[in-house]
Structures are given as structure tokens and as C-alpha cells.
Image: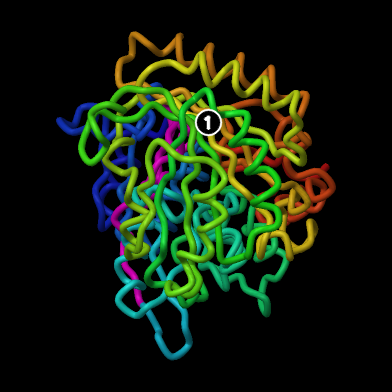
Amino acid sequence: MPDQTKIDEFKANLRGRLVLPDDPDYEESCKVYNGMIHKHPAMIAYCTDVTDVITAVNFGRENNLLTAVRGGGHNGGGLGICDDGLVIDLSSIKYTRVDPVAKTVRAGGGCTWGDVDHATHFFGYAVPCGIISTTGIGGLTLGGGIGHLSRSCGLSIDNLLEVDIVLANGTLVTANDKQNEDLYWAVRGGGGNFGVVTSFLYKLNPVKMVYAGPILYELEDTKKVMQWYRDFIQNAPNELNGFFAFLTVPPVAPFPEHLHNKKMCGIVWAYTGDINEAENVFKPIRSFLKPALDFVGTMPLPTLNSMFDALYGPGMQWYWRADFVNELSDEAIDVHIKYGNEMPPGFSTMHLYPINGVAKEVRNNDTPWAYRDAVWAEVIVGVDPDPANKDLITKWTKDYWEATHPYSSGGAYVNFMMDEGEERIKATYKDNYQRLASVKKKYDPNNFFRVNQNIKPAA
């Protein structure tokens, strides 16, 4: 640990704040989105600009400090914080600049998707993101970026044109398809292994209004719904996205009282095509089985992207497990039904996100994201506001995952993973792992950035 003189000098050289264990806001600064994560770093550097980030990286490296990078959002696995080391917090690097002529948006590394949505929607554009607007752009993008627009616009990484990134040696570089091309390839799915991204440049897609929302069915109809969905979504037009979910209906408006706290299955739809054609597109959806609830309608895209924000606020207990899935067999559906029925009350859920459509048009080795040939990204999430239920939701999630894993295709979307070990990471990147390890050796040979889904430098 550096002595007090070095810490004082570091603090003086930061434009942002350096929070230390004796500071009154230290405990609050240690909190992360996942209330199950409790770690206590030696210091937290709130960086306001690139110079602060460079200063923090150099300080961490020169003093041999375990260093974590925290963006503006979630990181369900708690990899944005560490014990006894340095946290580089980017939440103050929050800005957006839309260029409507070039059809791009540049956003600071501390932005959330709500920030980007707000900036781009006014101009009639969008960037593919997730399903909760409080998610940080950094973590979601660097891991891939699945969401409502995956089938129509691809993953977030498919729309990433450029990054500014501070490397382990403290230098700032730009990576795009013309400079540092190997690094540009690696950050599009390789996570935070290669540096601190302070700026993201995305191409914009002409999406403003969507015809979207959840359609819910009785739990006893799950087999019919999943069998119909597995075939329908693979042949649906690219403009139509829909992810399957198990859920417990929240006891709040606008959900009708007779459904409150009821376990159900459903599909959350998002249609980005011609709104005038939406009713026709949804005719086969609405005709196959009478739903218990149909909340689909025309809305601004930011409304859809923030629809679940209030339900999944910060500080709840979270435990994730995930897989990629190629086929949804009847046998697998029976397993899903068993655990859907056993789902703990409250906020726990299971989602099947389609990754076909435009997202499938990219080859497996064009980016590190190695499962373009999969059909779904499955995530099982135990969520509860009460720490007393931590073991309950963790056991349900693990048991569910172990039962469905034999029906999976191997690895998992890194943004849906906890700390699960090196073999799971290798399975996730498949043939791209060795190339990532080579890029890691070039840009971070000593594995300074290792508080992440870590890719070790090639030998």
C-alpha cells in the first residue's frame, strides 16, 4: 500500500474526488448495483476526465494496486469494485454528442443507456442497447450488447465505430477500423480486459417510435407458448424482436389487481418497422393463444428501454447464471416449466434473448463474440430486495442452470456471468480466446486490468 505522501500527491493531482476509508461517504461509495456484493477498496478515484483516468491508472500500476474499473451502471457480477485496491470510477465522465449529419453519437464512459437514449431520440435515432436504461454503456457494450434492437440493428458492438481507451501503461489511444485495428476487434466483446474506455462512438439507427411491450400468459400455458415461440421468432421479420420470460407480476399499476404477485410466462416484444403495419405483424402473435394480458402498443423507444427501471433498482440481491442455446427441445421446455413453477416470489426471472436476425449476419470471428450461430442467450436471475433470501435465490438459480445446461451450446454472454472461472471464459470465446490473449499480451502484458471476466495474456 502506498504511503500517505503518495496518496496525498495522487489526491492533489486528481480533478475529481479521491474517497478514502475514513471519509464520511466511503461506505456509500462502496455500494454497487448488486446488493449481494460487499467489497472495500483502499481508495475510490472519481475521475472527471481522461487526465484523471491516466493519473489513476499510473498510480495503480506504479503502486502495484489491484485495480477495478467502474462505469456508470450495473455490473451484476460485482466486477467494478475490489477489496484493498483502487477503484477507477467513470460515473462523472458523462456526456453525449449527436452528429445528425454523420449519424453518430459519442458518449463518455460513465454514461448510462438512458443518457444515450435521451440524446439520440430527439433526432429520431437509436443505438442498440439492453432492456434497462440505468445500465452503463461501458460494460454492456464491451461485453457485446444484447437487447430490444438485436434482431433489427445487431448488437451494441456491431454499431461501435471507435473507442478512446487508456492502456495499462497510461497512454491514451484511439481504436477503430483504421488504427489499432487489433484492439478495436478485441474491445467489441472482449470486456474490460484491454484498458479503460473513456469514450464510445456509435453509428445511429433510424428508430424513434416502436410498437412494443409485454404479452403475458398463464403459467400452465408455458409449453404451448415456448413451443410456438421457438419456431416463430426464428422466422420472424428482422424488425420484430421478442424475448421469452418467466416473471412474477408486480403488485403495482398498471398491472390489473387480479394478476398481482402471480407467476406467469410472457414475451416482451419490440417492433421497429413501419408502425402502420404493426397490427398486421402482430396478428399471428395475438391469434395463436388468448393472452392473460396484452400491454403492446406504440411508444417512444426510451419508454420501452426504461419500462423495467423502477422494478430493478439498485441495492437488491442478484445472482446470475447464463448459457447460449441453439435448440429449445420439448425436453428442455419441460425442465424450464419445472423451474418456472419453482421460481421464488418477487423479482426473480428467466429470459431467452434471441440473437438471430441482423445480429446473426456477423461471423463468429469478426468480433470476439463467438456465438453468432446460437439462437438465444439464456439468463437465469435470482433477484430479491431482502438479504435474508440470498441463499434461496442463489440455490434456485444454480439448480435451474445445472438442469438446463445440458441443453445449451456451451459458453455464456459475459455480461450475464458471475465469477465462474477461466474455463467458462474460454468456453465463451471459443476459437477467439487465443487471439484475445495475444491482444491482451500486446496491450496489457502484466494483466493489470484483471478485475473482469479475465483473459490472461498469451504466454
Residue drawn at x 49%, y 30% as measured from the top left: 246
Query: 61 or 407: nearer the eye?
Result: 407
Kindly tell me whether residue 421 is visible in this rendering. Answer: yes
Q: Position of residue 337 (x, y in %)?
A: 60, 21
**Which image quadrant: the N terminus?**
top left
**Quarter occupied by residue 427:** top right
Residue drawn at x 51%, y 66% as measured from the top left: 280
Residue 249 within the segment the image draws in magenta: no
Which stretch appears magenta? 70-97
Residue drawn at x 35%, y 48% as measured from the top left: 295
Q: Position of residue 27 (x, y in %)?
A: 24, 27
**Quarter occupied by residue 254:** top left
Query: 172 or 112: nearer the eye?
Result: 112
- Name the residue that disc number 1 marks: 350
**Which image quadrant: the C terminus?**
top right
Q: Is residue 116 above or below residue 371?
A: below
Q: Position of residue 106 (x, y in %)?
A: 42, 73
Residue type pointed to by label 1: Met
Secondary structure mostly taken by the magenta-highlighted segment of the chain: loop
Q: Is residue 221 left or right of residue 71?
A: right
Most extreme residue toward the bottom, as rendered? 101
